[in-house]
Image: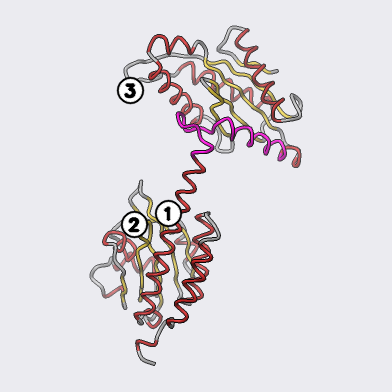
Amino acid sequence: MTTGDIGPSRDRELEVLIDVGKALSSTLDLKEILQLVMHRLGMLFPVSHRAILILDIDADDLCYEVVSGIRADALFHNRVKKGRSVPGWIAMHGEVVFVEDVYKDSRFDKEYSLVILEGDRSVLGVPLKYKNHLVGVIELANPDPAPFLSITARETLSAVASLVAAAIDGARSYSRLQHMVIVDELTGLYNASYLLDFIGNEIERALRYKTPLSLIFIDLDFFKKVNDSHGHLVGSRMITEVGLLLKANIRKSDIAARYGGDEFVLVLPNTGKDGAKVLAGNLRRVVAEHDFLVAEGCFIKVTASFGISSFPEDGDSKLTVLQNADKAMYMAKQGGRNMVCCI
């Protein structure tokens, strides 16, 4: 067999590209996209190591998102700095790389390659680029170079990479759109619409598993004075800071939402009234002791009133539980503010 005959045939290449295109058009979920691609790469390139790395723009490095092979568990979510090893070099230069023996190539860190690739000396890697922007890297490796020698193999992988990069960009755009629909623009917390859906889902879960559920309704005290004294721009920034403060002081399983104006709601799955009281008491102190807008030189103090309701004792639907938390908050207002009340 000649070098030109090794690897996928043109008919096989076209068949795979059509198959990949159909698969990628069937979903907008990024994880599902990557799993689909990995499965089809395995059919096309039965090599010992296959991986898809995604560029983390904030950290400016690559993360192994999907890995197949004997080192899959060790490499999953492992990170690679730009310029280091084959995928790092590809991310820095944006070029296809084929290396017959990675340990003899001066471009790559031999010790690092030994850890990542072990006995896989031959590597074929392609950048995932969409509209000239790198989004990731596909990395294939094998003990011998036979699967990578044909030009067809490299062209096929590059063509697959183009489809994958477009699909990743589409999935990210869809994810950003979904985020905009459910998130309050000012605070970054969930909005009221998502809040109601979430409470409904959690009530169904609480019924199914017979677990407690509590809500905390929060309203800032005398917030109008902040707007009157400092202006609405400062007031808006303060709302944002309150949202961040609340989010930083709840569990990952809890959610915080901006209900409207200076009102917030916390949903606490698997939490009874006693647990909600403890959290609300802690948050009351955190808010009251915090200096807001220090960076702006304002050092504003504010307090908040907290109302608690729990499912099922305080309501049998998402609206009644929420309304009763609101009523409890107004009890706190009437009782002197800066306090916690239960319905």
Pointer 1: residues within 10 angstroms few (<14), some, or many (20+)?
A: some
Q: What's the amino acid at mark 1?
A: Asp
* Residue wearing tag 3: 295
- Residue in the foreground of this view, choosing between 129 and 58: 129
Q: Quadrant location of the N terminus? A: bottom left
Residue 112 location in percent, x, y? 33, 64
Residue 150 location in percent, x, y? 36, 82
Pointer 2: residues within 10 angstroms few (<14), some, or many (20+)?
A: few
Q: Write down the region rendered in magenta.
A: 180-205
User: Which numbered dot is residue 131?
Assistant: 2
Q: Residue furthest left?
A: 106
Q: Residue at x 31, y 75 (%)?
A: 99
Residue 151: quarter of image: bottom left
- Residue in the foreground of this view, choosing between 221 and 213: 221
Q: Quadrant location of the C terminus? A: top right
* Residue wearing tag 1: 169
Q: Main secondary structure of the magenta part?
A: helix
